[in-house]
Amino acid sequence: MSNSANASPLGKPSAYCTQYDPSLLFPIARQGKRDELGLSGALPFFGVDIWNAYEVSWLNLRGKPEVAIATVIVPADSPNIIESKSFKLYLNSFNQTKLAGSDALLHLLRADLSAGFGAAVQITLIPAHEFATLKMGQMEGLLLDRLDIEVDSYQPNPALLFTEPDTAAVEETLVSHLLKSNCLVTGQPDWASVQIQYVGAPINQEGLLKYLIGLREHNEFHEQCVERIFIDILRRCKPIKLAVYARYTRRGGLDINPWRSNFSTGKMPSNLRHARQ
């Protein structure tokens, strides 16, 4: 059962539960925001939301704490998202819960999160002894932020998106670190880097950068912002192929990294942690 964002734990005092409680998860239907974008029926994209959870801990059967990093891969066609504060509260509920091992934890996570999102999710755990193998990276592509532009609007404006006239199709990857949106409920800032890959008429880069900066005072969840960017570029610039990937800065021990695409390369984008994550 999904709920409205305003009824979520966001912006409200919350008890710190340290015993396993899957009822803490708060699903929100994706379709409400997709209706605002005029999306119904078959989606014009596929993709995933990549969640990384850095505050995962439980007790072994002798009461000794264990820690891990969890990665959760959620299909974009799942009916729900899970509100991130409720996700954190749910993970916290394992902190004083005794489990037979990481497999027991994975079993519970898969069952509970798949039920919450309304679709099967993929989950991996990185144990503490493997932390040293983790690496960092950055998005590849031409940096839009190099452009010296004047900006006077900080709300989404699709009219800023247009292609260069009378030009041949190109294959291009563009990156910006200037994406900022705000939480739909609390208005707190969400910071991200975004990568746009496309094949089609060249997109005017100054207009695209102004458009991305234009989300700076816009209130939506991460997943919704990425879908808005995808749909606005698709409709205004009509690329043959398009993929939009955003990596958001961690909050409350969680980062959320939505990816939407209308073409397949046979693999997901990299999940390497960025400098700001």
Image (cartoon, rainbow, N blue to C red):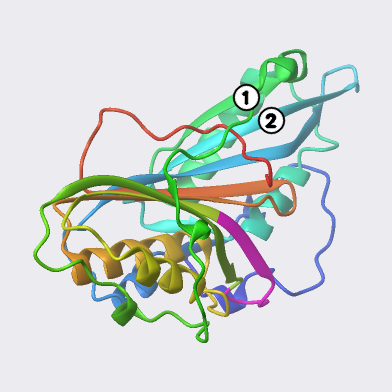
- The picture places residue 22, in percent across and down from the top left corner, at 64, 48
Secondary structure of the residue carrying tag 2 is strand
Magenta-colored stretch includes residue 189: yes
Place of residue 154 in the rendered image (x, y in percent of width and height, measured from the top left): 53, 82
Query: Mark 1: few, some, or many residues within 10 Å (few <14, many ≥20)?
Result: some
Where does the magenta region start and end? 184-192
Look at 24% across and 76% down and name the residue there. 38
54 left or right of 22? right
Q: In the rendered structure, which disc, 1 or 2, sits on the residue that comes first in sequence?
A: 2
Q: Where is residue 96 in the image (x, y as percent from the top left)?
A: 86, 36
Where is mark 1, residue-wise?
A: 125
- Specify whether residue 100 is in view: no
Q: State left or right for residue 146 relative to residue 89.
A: left
**Separation of marks 1 and 2 at Cα, in angstroms:** 6 Å
Looking at this view, name the residue that lies furthest to the bottom.
Answer: 152
Question: Is residue 33 at all visible to an observer of this figure?
Answer: yes
Residue 136 figure quarter: top right
**View extreme (right): residue:** 63
Q: Give the residue type at disc 2.
A: Ile
Q: Position of residue 91 (x, y in %)?
A: 71, 43
Q: Residue furthest front?
A: 148
Question: Do callouts 1 and 2 mark residues in contact (Cβ within 8 Å)?
Answer: yes
- Total tally of numbered discs in the picture: 2
82 vs 57: above or below? below
Q: Is residue 183 above or below residue 21?
A: below
SS type, badge 1: strand
Q: Does the magenta stretch include residue 29?
A: no
Residue matched to label 2: 69
Question: In the figure, residue 160 lies in which quadrant?
Answer: bottom left
Three-letter code, disc 1: Leu
Of residues 154 and 126, which is closer to you in this image?
154
